[in-house]
Image (spheres, rainbow, N blue to C red):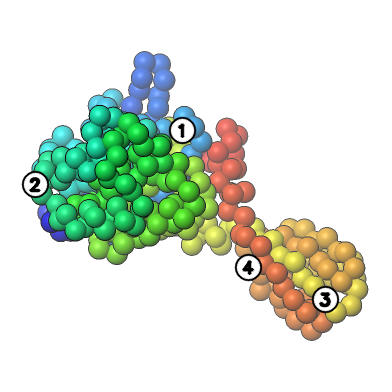
Amino acid sequence: MTTTRPVDDGTPPIDIRRLTKRFGPLTAVDTLDLTVGSGEIYGLLGPNGAGKSTTIRALMGFVNATSGTAGLLGGTARDLRLRSRVGYVGGDVVLDRGLRAQHLLNWYADLRGGVDPDAVDALCRRLSLDTDRKIGELSTGNRKKVAIVQAFMHRPDVLVLDEPTVGLDPLLQREVLNLVRERRADGCAVLFSSHLLPEVEDIADRVGILREGVLVREDTIASLREEARQRLELRFSDDVAPDLLDGVDGVASAEVDGHTVHVVVDGSVAPLLRRVADRGVDRIVSHDEDLEDIFFDYYQADGGAR
């Protein structure tokens, strides 16, 4: 069984430097710098056509960079010894439809010099994968399960996952995220591309937002949460004065409806809490922090900053 090993020369397991990829007049990725460290999950976000899949394909050696480098484990994916230490799930899962799932997984295990069959069986059970059926008989979701099992079964040092939960039901999506967390705990570097913002918020340590091939924002989830607007519902024992929250730092809007105030807060809620602490608050309901506002601003052609 493969065990996690550090990169010999001290470079990050994923080390992309000034990567540019052009297809004729189209620049799919433009001078991209991106690194992922051991034990880190990096969420790669962006709308369709932003360059996420092209970045991943360049990292995996499926397309040649126009310029720049896509470093992997101290070398590149062209080195098959390094590539054997990587687990990859592509956005489009293409498998041999004539093979049974078990035979295909055995073939992948042999390519990697042998994999503990108990580990493979455990993964199949966790994902409820029937390995006796032919690939061509499996649904899209079950084919995705096969791809996930082959990516995780050798305990890779790097995971490159392009929309890995698409086509899975919510329970299995959660299980896949648990698998990713387990690999991170073992020191694996994870590049995780997704369109599902709550999914990335839940799992990533850092995120990068691509737009038109350019990395327009890179930050930690914790830092982004500090910027996110919070939507609160404050319920009071008596009617509320319309001007109760006037002048409170961070309050972007406040709508009073009898005993209830609906508030949108930018940043810290501390000034708000100080204002209402002695005003007879019975209950405060916190809705989801609205990170989507930040992400969608960067997704728009005129939003964010390059």
Furthest-left residue in this view: 113
Closest to the camera, between mark 3 and mark 4, is: 3
Q: Say what secondary structure mark 4 lies in.
A: loop
Residue at horizontal 36%, vertical 19%?
23
> Distance of mark 1 from mark 3, alpha carbons?
46 Å
Residue at horizontal 26%, vertical 43%?
132
Residue 70, label in figure? none
* Place of residue 162 in the rendered image (x, y in percent of width and height, measured from the top left): 37, 41
Closest to the camera, between mark 2 and mark 4, is: 2
Residue bearing mark 4: 268
Residue bearing mark 2: 113
Q: Are marks 4 and 1 in contact (CB under 8 Å)?
A: no
* Place of residue 270 in the rendered image (x, y in percent of width and height, measured from the top left): 66, 73
Tell me which amino acid carries mark 2.
Gly
Counting residues from the N terminus, which is met first, the one under dot 4 or under dot 1?
Answer: 1
> Distance of mark 2 from mark 1, alpha carbons?
36 Å
Furthest-top residue in this view: 24
Residue 50, label in figure? 1
Counting residues from the N terminus, which is met first, the one under dot 2 or under dot 4?
Answer: 2
Closest to the camera, between mark 4 and mark 1, is: 1
Closest to the camera, between mark 2 and mark 3, is: 2
Say left or right for 86 vs 45: left
